[in-house]
Image (spheres, rainbow, N blue to C red):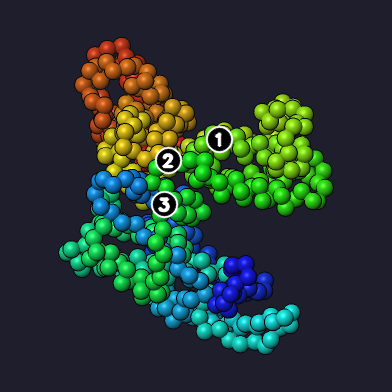
């Protein structure tokens, strides 16, 4: 809700659900959640187990790369925010959606009893005015509401896909054709990607009109998407000003409370660090941003203000040492930032069902190994930063061998001797009569190793340790 809203329509109802009601809806939500990943398309990442908000942000960043340049294929991106989406959902639509995906009638009746019973009262000049029955909408704070809303948004996805299948003239965004991506969705935040073609755009927009009346406002990049700046170039200090302002505002709200040193330390550890944590888990932050944020933490710790200078007893580096080494146990943002972003590399090898992972393999890797692919001059800033972390990530990732179809024979760590190409050099390819793109599956038949006869001491050493490797049911990164 906006501050001082001029219209009654801009007020948001407060849902007051008792404990018994929440226990019932939590049980229903758990039942629905168990099968949600099978019902919801991969372009929706909200409230579905195993999916992450970062996937949508990373993919959206890749798709808007180069939008600030007047070259390349014409493409279009439309950011849609469904206004008061939770409060506008028709109950009959939700119930029909549940029946359409095969939910038992008794389960649908239970959901009907939960969502059609709210009553509202209005607080006017401090006094409550009566109760009246609601006619639509989902209660925010209800454990069941997020799952029902995601199911409703899946109908929009199916409408998009049906319209695309029916039309022979629809053109995908140039980088979305292989995966047939028309949009990315996270709850009520929608990003549509399509070719800069009037017919293709109108096909998708006509389906959105079934959900709400469209009102467009012309803007320019960067725009905010899921709390992060959506940028066509590199992440700069100016793009991160909202993060710095948010931290400064939080510190300023505490300056009049005369907090003790221990209190300020606890606030930095539990509150201020969590503010920057979301940003740090998506992108590698510019060094100037990290320095500015840590300076504000330091000033607040020693002086109680965001802008106070001087007065530090020891350096911030010493403050962030572990307690057993004489520090206060705070985290260095740069180290946390790098560790958090490394998980995206982990997802490339472990999240086979992720839309972002599938897109990276189709559009960026194109059958090549992540460890050896060159850094293209035209790649996005985010992908370039991710490739620069390969040296740190390589030693942290190993593989259990199944059929070997997803494991690189020479570049992945699956053998007791480590990464074979790193250990033995380029000559090992000639000794093994193999190539750089070979998979482990090329030396496995019927769950047995089938290497060619050893022609060098290196090959003898490699093959002598194969008995130590247990072949599993399927490949797995660990």
Q: Is residue 202 above or below residue 341?
A: below
x%, y% of residue 365? 30, 38
Q: Which residue is mark 3?
A: 221
Can residue 44 be seen in this snapshot? no
Q: Which residue is mark 2?
A: 234
* Residue nearest the observer in this picture, 32 or 219: 219
Q: Secondary structure at mark 3?
A: loop
Q: Which residue is situated farthest in the top direction here?
A: 457
Q: Which residue is mark 1?
A: 288
* Residue nearest the observer in this picture, 473 or 97: 97
Residue 135 — which label? none
Q: The C terminus appears in which quarter of the rendering?
A: top left
Say whether disc 2 or disc 1 marks the residue closer to the N-terminus. 2
Cα separation, mark 2 vs mark 1, equals 14 Å
Asked if residue 396 lies left or right of residue 233, the reply is right
Q: The N terminus appears in which quarter of the rendering?
A: bottom right
Asked if residue 17 lies left or right of residue 164, the reply is right
x%, y% of residue 350? 41, 43
x%, y% of residue 437? 26, 30
Say whether disc 2 or disc 3 marks the residue closer to the N-terminus. 3
Can residue 3 be seen in this snapshot? yes
Which quadrant of the view contains residue 321?
Answer: top right
Q: Residue at x 40, y 54 (%)?
A: 220
Asked if residue 274 lies left or right of residue 477, the reply is right
Is the C-beta separation of discs 1 and 3 under 8 Å?
no
Q: Residue at x 41, y 52 (%)?
A: 221
Q: Residue at x 53, y 70 (%)?
A: 145
Q: Is residue 413 above or below residue 17?
A: above
Q: Secondary structure at mark 2?
A: loop
Which quadrant of the view contains residue 65?
Answer: top left
């Amino acid at each position: 809700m906006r501050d001082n809203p001029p219209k009654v329509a801009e007020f948001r109802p407060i849902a007051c659900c008792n404990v018994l009601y929440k226990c019932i809806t939590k049980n229903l939500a758990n039942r629905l959640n168990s099968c949600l990943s099978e019902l919801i398309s991969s372009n929706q990442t909200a409230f579905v187990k195993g999916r992450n908000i970062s996937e949508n942000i990373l993919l959206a960043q890749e798709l808007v790369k180069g939008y600030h340049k007047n070259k390349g294929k014409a493409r279009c991106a439309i950011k849609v925010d469904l206004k008061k989406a939770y409060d506008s959902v028709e109950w009959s639509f939700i119930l029909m959606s549940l029946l359409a995906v095969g939910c038992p009638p008794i389960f649908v009746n239970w959901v009907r009893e939960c969502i059609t019973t709210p009553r509202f009262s209005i607080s006017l000049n401090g006094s409550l005015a009566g109760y009246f029955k609601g006619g639509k909408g989902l209660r925010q704070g209800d454990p069941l509401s997020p799952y029902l809303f995601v199911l409703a948004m899946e109908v929009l996805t199916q409408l998009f896909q049906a319209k695309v299948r029916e039309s022979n003239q629809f053109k995908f965004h140039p980088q979305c054709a292989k995966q047939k991506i028309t949009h990315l969705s996270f709850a009520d935040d929608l990003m549509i990607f399509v070719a800069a073609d009037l017919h293709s755009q109108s096909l998708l927009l006509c389906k959105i009109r079934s959900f709400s009346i469209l009102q467009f406002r012309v803007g320019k990049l960067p725009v905010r998407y899921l709390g992060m700046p959506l940028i066509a170039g590199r992440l700069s200090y100016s793009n991160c000003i909202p993060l710095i302002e948010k931290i400064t505002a939080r510190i300023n709200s505490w300056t009049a409370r005369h907090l003790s040193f221990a209190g300020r330390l606890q606030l930095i550890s539990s509150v201020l660090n969590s503010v920057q944590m979301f940003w740090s888990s998506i992108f590698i932050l510019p060094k100037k941003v990290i320095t500015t944020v840590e300076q504000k933490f330091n000033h607040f710790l020693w002086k109680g203000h965001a802008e106070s200078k001087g007065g530090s007893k020891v350096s911030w580096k010493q403050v962030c040492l572990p307690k057993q080494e004489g520090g206060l146990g705070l985290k260095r943002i740069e180290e946390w930032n790098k560790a958090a972003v490394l998980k995206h590399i982990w997802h490339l090898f472990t999240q086979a069902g992720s839309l972002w992972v599938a897109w990276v393999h189709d559009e960026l890797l194109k059958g090549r190994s992540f460890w050896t692919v060159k850094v293209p001059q035209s790649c996005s800033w985010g992908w370039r930063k991710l490739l620069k972390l390969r040296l740190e990530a390589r030693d942290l990732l190993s593989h259990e061998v199944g059929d070997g179809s997803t494991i690189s024979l020479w570049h992945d760590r699956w053998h007791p001797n480590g990464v074979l190409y790193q250990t033995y050099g380029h000559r090992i390819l000639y000794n093994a009569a193999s190539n750089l793109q070979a998979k482990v599956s090329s030396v496995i038949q019927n769950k047995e190793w089938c290497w060619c006869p050893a022609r060098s001491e290196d090959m003898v050493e490699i093959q002598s340790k194969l008995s130590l490797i247990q072949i599993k049911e399927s490949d797995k990164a660990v």
